[in-house]
Image: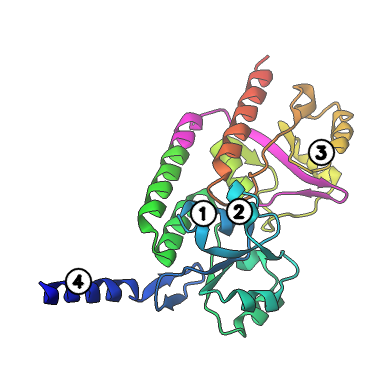
Amino acid sequence: MIRALGLLALFIASAASADVTVTDDAGRTVTLKAPAHRIVSLAPNITDALFAAGAGSYVVGTSRFSDHPDEAKKVPIIGDATMIDLERIVGLKPDVIVVWRSGTPAAQVEKLSRLGIPILYSETTRLADVAPATRRFGTLAGTQDVADRNAAAFDASLAKLRSDYAGKARLKVFYQIWDRPLMTIGRAQIIDDALDLCGGDNIFADLSQAAPTVTREAVLARDPDVIISGDGGGHDDLAVWRQSGFLSAVKHDNVMTVDTPTLASPSPSILASVDVLCRRLDEARTRNQR
């Protein structure tokens, strides 16, 4: 009996210290000696996905604007998209740093790589990327059951939204994220994917940048059916569009703001905002039919 208990204890200890191997979004294999229980997240969307993966209690440092879920607001902030406190990161003794490479300056990533701490790149850019990222973080932190459950729920909700809005009349959409300079979304921004799901065609999807600067004349030339200004997108400037009486969006009173605080975040919290966006576009369709 004593021998059996000893073998069981040895098995449990071995399982707890087993290597964890994850392939990240840069195609790199990241191997840890054990599940990561001290994680630094360098992007709000990564933080959100780590919590959805059941690893929220293991996040010891995160970036500014990590507001989702609410529990993430309690995690110490170690930087933002432009500046990272490297000394503080070292002091946190993380098992791994999870980096959103396109959202972190290359110079900062280079400095991080010199710390000798494992780095995992996460690069979710489309809605279909969110659940796999959640599952990957579950593997990383040893919380696979929770991660799989929440990832499956996300996929089911996403599939329902796709089904609900499949076949809807397509609308040409100009999505304004800032007014001076005039900025919109290109195909690299996840809002482009959300618009497509809702039956909207981003009029600047031909631009590769996530947030390109455009001219007012270019918007007028593409004559959108709907003009949307997101949170903080220069709402006062919508009056300028309403003065352009020949625009389809103006003729049908489809110049609007949307309250979608998570729409730009490629993370599990995005779906509530996608739902709002889809509903607003449906309202625009109804006005178009009058």
Label 2 and label 1: CA atoms lie apart by 8 Å
Residue 18 point in image, percent of width and height: 33, 75
Residue 209 point in image, percent of width and height: 69, 58
Q: Earlier in the sequence, mark 4 or mark 1?
A: 4
Q: Nearer the viewer, mark 1 or mark 3?
A: 1
Q: In the structure shown, which secondary structural element does the residue marked by tag 4 occupy? A: helix
Above or below for 175 versus 284 = below
Please name the residue that numbered disc 1 is placed on: 51
Residue at image position (48%, 36%) is: 162
Please name the residue that numbered disc 2 is placed on: 72
Mark 2 touching mark 1, by CB under 8 A?
Answer: yes
Label 1 and label 3: CA atoms lie apart by 42 Å
Instruction: Tell me if I can see residue 37 in this picture.
Output: yes
Q: Nearer the viewer, mark 3 or mark 2?
A: 2
Q: In the structure shown, which secondary structural element does the residue marked by tag 3 occupy? A: helix
Q: Which residues are magenta?
A: 160-188
Instruction: Tell me if I can see residue 188 in this picture.
Output: no
Residue at image position (57%, 37%) is: 272
What amino acid does circle 3 point to?
A: Leu
Please name the residue that numbered disc 3 is placed on: 220
